[in-house]
Image (cartoon, rainbow, N blue to C red):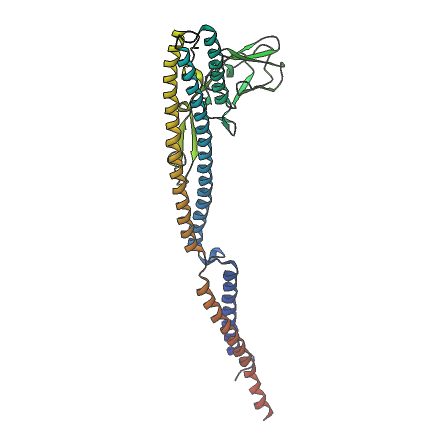
Amino acid sequence: MRINTNVSALRSQRSLGAVEEAVSKSMAKLSSGFRITRAGDDAAGLGIANVLRADIRALGQAARNAEQAGSVLNIADGAAGTVQKMLERMKELAAQASSDSVDSAGRSRITTEYQALRAEIDRTVATVKFQGNALLNGAFGATVDAASTVLGAGTGVYAARLNGAGTGAYTFSSGSNVVTLTNGSTSQTLGVTSATKQTLNFSSFGISVDTDMAVGAATVAGNITIAAGSGSFLVSASGQYSTNDQITISGSSLDLRSSTLTIATDPSSLANAQAALAEIDVAITQVNVAVGVIGSLQSRIETATENVKTTMQNFSAAESTIRDLDMAEEMTTFTKNQILVQAGTAMLAQANQAGQSVLTLLRG
């Protein structure tokens, strides 16, 4: 019999410590609902779960992107329908002017309304935007051509930004402390200060240019070309971010400006009215093509939205399988370990009492 080293007590203490540690781990899992509360629980599983969770969040944003893309297309669809209605009225007016039952004064009044409708088409197209991006003037996804001469050396212009500008060529010309930007018959003139960093915002066109200290009173000259491009919507997160995860739409397929629709002839005479009718027929066909593009993309994005939400659901299920806790199973383990703690504590007390028997020998 030994009293310096109580081996039974040490064994009981070791077992009790291990069980208490297991109880502590079970409490952490039960309180969090996670099977993995630290990397040591399952390092490989935690790594897989982290990747899945990141993918789920990216897919969630992709789903919101798809819903926003649907909103963009709905706006474009509504505006295209408005243009279609105006073309229908213009065709009605041109048909009316194509009959000699209308005199010259009547054709003059018809022409006034016809011109107003054409101007309204352009105004509608110029103002239909989403987050500053024009949708129906061919500029959706458009970019500034790097060959634009206004960005060349010596002009003082180092950057150009777009805010709904339509595709085409724009010409800069400088005068005495002023810069004029011209596109067709439209122009806008702004003041410019020499040797000063400034932003010239040509709001009539949706174009801004930034100048540096090299700019002079008459150096801003040349042209800027807005090239058609493609608008992109990220509607998935499979890892093919620049290809299959994107749905693109060609900006040039949604160009409903009157100049593109070529409705230039006024019904001011019998012959002109007949020519205008032919132009409107072509314009209506172009609008229908644009509507077809919008409709096909609406259908595609609705399908993409449904698919990405299904993928999110399945990824969430996979992540749950790896990381989430089976509460019933863990509660069984927790209860067992609690009983073992109580038993271990009792046995440790008994082991600590074993040395008391030595006193009997000493008394004898």
Which residue is rendered at x = 44% and y = 6% of the image? 103
Residue 132: horizontal and vertical position, in percent? Answer: 52, 27
Residue 206 x %, y %: 53, 21
Q: Among all residues in the image, which is located at the extreme bottom?
A: 364
How many circles with numbers are drawn on the protein? 0
Q: Is residue 211 above or below residue 23?
A: above
Q: Position of residue 309 (x, y in %)?
A: 41, 44
Residue at left 57%, top 10%? Answer: 174
**Quarter of the image containing the C terminus?**
bottom right
Image-quadrant location for residue 299: top left
Q: Nearer the viewer, residue 343 or 263?
A: 263
Residue 145 in view, yes or no? no
Residue reaching furthest front? 101
Is there any visible trace of residue 349 in the rendered image? Answer: yes
* Residue at the (41%, 48%) spot, across then down: 313
Q: From this view, report whether residue 25 is shown above or below residue 189.
A: below
Rendered position, 304 above or below 87: below
User: Camera-side residue: 62 or 280?
Assistant: 280
Percent across and percent down for residue 118 are 47, 16
Q: Is residue 206 left or right of residue 47?
A: right
In the shown orientation, is residue 292 left or right of residue 124? left
